[in-house]
Amino acid sequence: IMVDVEFVKKSSNFISARLKGHAESTDQEFDMVCSAISVISQTILIGMLEVLKVDAEYSIDDGFLSFSVEKLSDDDIKKCQVLIKTMLLGLKNLEISYGKYINVSVKEV
């Protein structure tokens, strides 16, 4: 069981992220990692929507979260970069310690 995370970068800006995976295990360590992933990703999304007040497209479901800022103005995309990069760093840090549970990648388009 693993959570796959893919960030998409276009030019020098991150434009989207997709997290997919679900804890169907009683393994306490995995549940902790899954919780951390959820907290990091949902906090960043709330920051974009509620603090920056950008109209990012997003979807949240059981074991799934995605968002895209690609259709926003250049100014709004730039505003979101600090939060998205913070999310990437937080999840990469989890991957260092718990790599058997989370895989983080960046795709350039």
Image (cartoon, grey):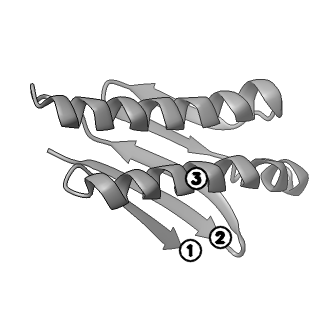
Q: Which residue bears the numbered disc 1?
A: 109
The answer to whether mark 1 and mark 2 are in CB contact below 8 A is yes
Element type at mark 3:
strand
Which residue is depicted at the point 76% across and 24% down? 50
Element type at mark 1:
loop
Q: Which residue bears the numbered disc 2?
A: 10
Residue 92 picture location, percent across and down? 45, 58
Residue 88 picture location, percent across and down? 54, 55
Snapshot quadrant of residue 62: top left
Which quarter of the figure is the C terminus placed in?
bottom right
Give the farthest residue toward the left.
Answer: 26
Which residue is depicted at the point 45% across and 51% down? 91
Looking at the image, is mark 2 or mark 3 earlier in the sequence? 2
Residue 36 located left or right of residue 3: right
Snapshot quadrant of residue 56: top right
Q: CA distance from mark 2 to mark 3?
A: 9 Å
Query: Label 1 neighbourhood size at 10 Å, few (<14), some (14-19), many (20+)?
Result: few
Q: Which residue bears the numbered disc 3?
A: 16
Looking at the image, is mark 1 or mark 2 earlier in the sequence? 2
